[in-house]
Image: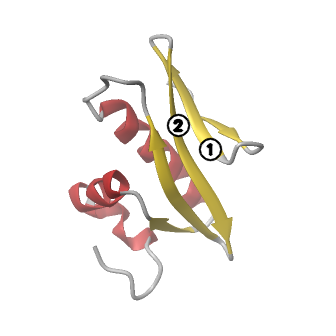
């Protein structure tokens, strides 16, 4: 799966089985705020979103950015993957 950064719409996008998944973001002061998730109707499985988040976070880590998980599914991802918690800004606990 390829995750593309659509800077015009400020969202990361992936095309899977003809469906578009997207994670909306904003960047402020070297922090990546992950604000909304868009997935096709009826897509109950979060596997695609989790795979997208892994790629997004790995890319953010390379750029030495901190990540602010705003959307509940992103917060849940951080809880299930404690290896990424060091990317949270100081003082933020999940």
- In the rendered image, which residue does mark 2 sit on? 22
Mark 2 is surrounded, within 10 Å at the Cα level, by few (under 14), some (14 to 19) or many (20 or more) other residues, namely: many
Identify the mark at residue 3; answer none if there is no mark: none
Q: 58 or 68, which is in the foreground?
A: 68
Q: Secondary structure at mark 2?
A: strand
Q: 55 or 31, which is in the foreground?
A: 31
Seen from this angle, which residue lies furthest left?
A: 80
Q: Position of residue 41 (x, y in %)?
A: 37, 24
Q: Position of residue 19 (x, y in %)?
A: 48, 17
Q: Is residue 5 left or right of residue 74?
A: right
Seen from this angle, which residue lies furthest front?
A: 41
The C terminus appears in which quarter of the rendering?
bottom left
Residue 48 sits in quarter? top left
Seen from this angle, which residue lies furthest top?
A: 18
The Cα–Cα distance between marks 1 and 2, rounded to whole angstroms, is: 6 Å
Q: Secondary structure at mark 1?
A: strand
Q: Is residue 82 left or right of residue 74?
A: left
Q: Residue at x 67, y 72 (%)?
A: 28
Q: Is residue 2 left or right of residue 39?
A: right
- In the rendered image, which residue does mark 1 sit on? 11
* Marks 1 & 2, CB-CB < 8 Å contact: yes
Say whether disc 1 or disc 2 marks the residue closer to the N-terminus: 1
Q: Position of residue 20 (x, y in %)?
A: 52, 24
Q: Residue at x 31, y 79 (%)?
A: 93
Residue 63 sits in quarter? bottom right
């Amino acid at each position: 799966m390829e995750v593309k950064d659509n800077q015009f719409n400020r969202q990361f996008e992936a095309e899977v089985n003809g469906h578009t998944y997207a994670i909306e973001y904003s960047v402020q002061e070297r922090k990546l705020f992950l604000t909304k998730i868009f997935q096709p109707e009826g897509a109950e499985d979060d596997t695609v979103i989790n795979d997208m988040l892994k790629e997004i976070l790995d890319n953010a880590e390379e750029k030495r950015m901190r990540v602010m998980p705003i959307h509940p599914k992103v917060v849940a991802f951080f809880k299930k993957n404690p290896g990424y918690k060091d990317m949270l800004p100081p003082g933020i606990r999940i």
